[in-house]
Image: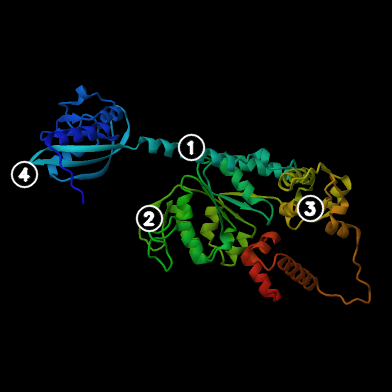
Amino acid sequence: MVKINFNSMDYQGLLEAVFLATQDAISVVDEKGEHILVNPAYTRITGIENDDIIGKNALFDIEDGEESVHMKVLSTKKPVENTKLKLRPSGKTVVAQAAPIIVNGEMKGSVAVLHDISTIKDLTDKLEEAEKKLRQLTYKYKPEDIIGRSKAINEVRKLIEKAAKVPATVLLRGESGTGKELFANSIHAQSSRSHKNFVRVNCAALSDSLLESELFGYDEGSFTGALKGGKKGLFEEANKGTIFLDEISEISLNTQAKLLRVLQEKEIMRVGSNKNIPIDVRVIAATNADLSKAVRDGKFREDLFYRLSILPIYIPPLRDRMEDIPLLTKSFIAKFNDEYGRNIVDISDEALMVLKSHDWPGNVRELENIIGRAIIYMNINERIIDTIHLPHLNKKKYTEEVVTINEEVHSLDNVLNKAESEYINKVYLRFNKNKTRTAKELGISLRSLYYKMEKYGIS
């Protein structure tokens, strides 16, 4: 170790250099709590000149209601660490540390170092503002973005506008593929909560225990594999914003009871905790199931059903708004032009007739998939979607299967089951036995896919 010897003048010069050079504010008070020394950084951070602070009490430079670290040191004779303070007149926020000055065993005063964190706060505020703008861009759906001019969709558009103006729970009902998430997004984006989070939860994609911990969060050590420090749940993530519970019919009766408590008491309890956490969340639920029947069958709580059904909105299937197909088709052409780098300009009248002759069991999602597939089939120099680009629908329109008198006649259930089994297996193999992708393409929940695969013996 190298030893360096200083004389008294060296010490004084060194201390003065440190005192003047540091970017943090330093203030020193005597045993009475009156300022006797500050450095130049103190004036820059507090806005108080040296001559104006000397002789002033330790409370002079902090906002009313704040506790002086100097006075705490003088009363306890112990150091004070990491205390957040707001200064005046600058209004800056600092983190303060202070320690007693003891000479020959006697308390002579206190010295404090004030670290300016206002810049960090400003950056945090700017980050929050950027996040707000990003959310506004992400959830920008408005009634005019809901495509269609049919009477059925215009009625829905009016209900969406009304729902956005009130904080009531909304239940979106409709078949799979009708675009319920789009409508939920639209409600959120037009509401007073649009600057906060929109959190989507697919209730069918998670097991009961996992869904509970995802929704409500958990405390550290509440189960094997729980993260250190615990984890916030999705309800907490959506606080002040909106949570969208898709496929609400799939949750268990146990989770239904806990969800009911959230709606009634406006508070949640993390898994493994006994502490209630207040929340302010707008709930939008969605289902393609008949919840009334589920209530009658004892699979869904009646009290929760009525809580969710304060403002029910029915999303019509595509077959009930066939006049919207041309507009929807053109919007999908524009979308896939961007995604695929194509320049498709239109669709022929004949091709539109083929689309309108289809019964659309997969609704708008199915139409979107078919338009995307048609564009993939097209040659690079083709600009108009025609019937030739819709081989599956075209074949269905122009061919007829006839059951001759000699053919064996089966029940309709058997025919439908066979067709469903074959189609599920075909899609399953096409996506390399990826169940999640298969369920998504079929427009059904993962749970429903597992049921059907077990039913038909598909492995």
Say which quarter of the image contains residue 80. Answer: top left
Q: Is residue 63 visible?
A: no
Disc 4 designates what residue?
Answer: 105
Q: Nearer the viewer, mark 1 or mark 3?
A: 3
Seen at 27% across and 35% down, the residue is: 22
Mark 4: secondary structure: loop
In the image, 222 versus 175, the foreground residue is: 222
Q: Nearer the viewer, mark 1 or mark 2?
A: 1
The number of numbered badges drawn on the structure is: 4
The amino acid on which the numbered mark 2 sits, given as a three-letter code, is Asn
Disc 3 designates what residue?
Answer: 376
Looking at the image, residue 50 sits to the left or right of residue 405; the answer is left
Disc 2 designates what residue?
Answer: 276
Q: Are marks 4 and 1 in contact (CB under 8 Å)?
A: no
Looking at the image, residue 273 sits to the left or right of residue 198; the answer is left
Q: Nearer the viewer, mark 3 or mark 2?
A: 3
What percent of the width, then of the height, locates residue 128?
46, 40
**Could you tell me how far apart the alpha carbons at marks 1 and 3 are, in whole angstroms?**
40 Å
Q: Residues within 10 Å of mark 2 (few under 14, many from 20)?
A: few
Q: Residues within 10 Å of mark 4 (few under 14, many from 20)?
A: few
The amino acid on which the numbered mark 3 sits, given as a three-letter code, is Ile
Q: Earlier in the sequence, mark 3 or mark 2?
A: 2
**Could you tell me how far apart the alpha carbons at marks 4 and 1 are, in whole angstroms?**
52 Å
Mark 3: secondary structure: helix
Q: Are marks 1 and 2 in contact (CB under 8 Å)?
A: no
Q: Check residue 129 in the rendering and tell me which mark sits there, or answer none.
A: 1
Q: Earlier in the sequence, mark 4 or mark 1?
A: 4
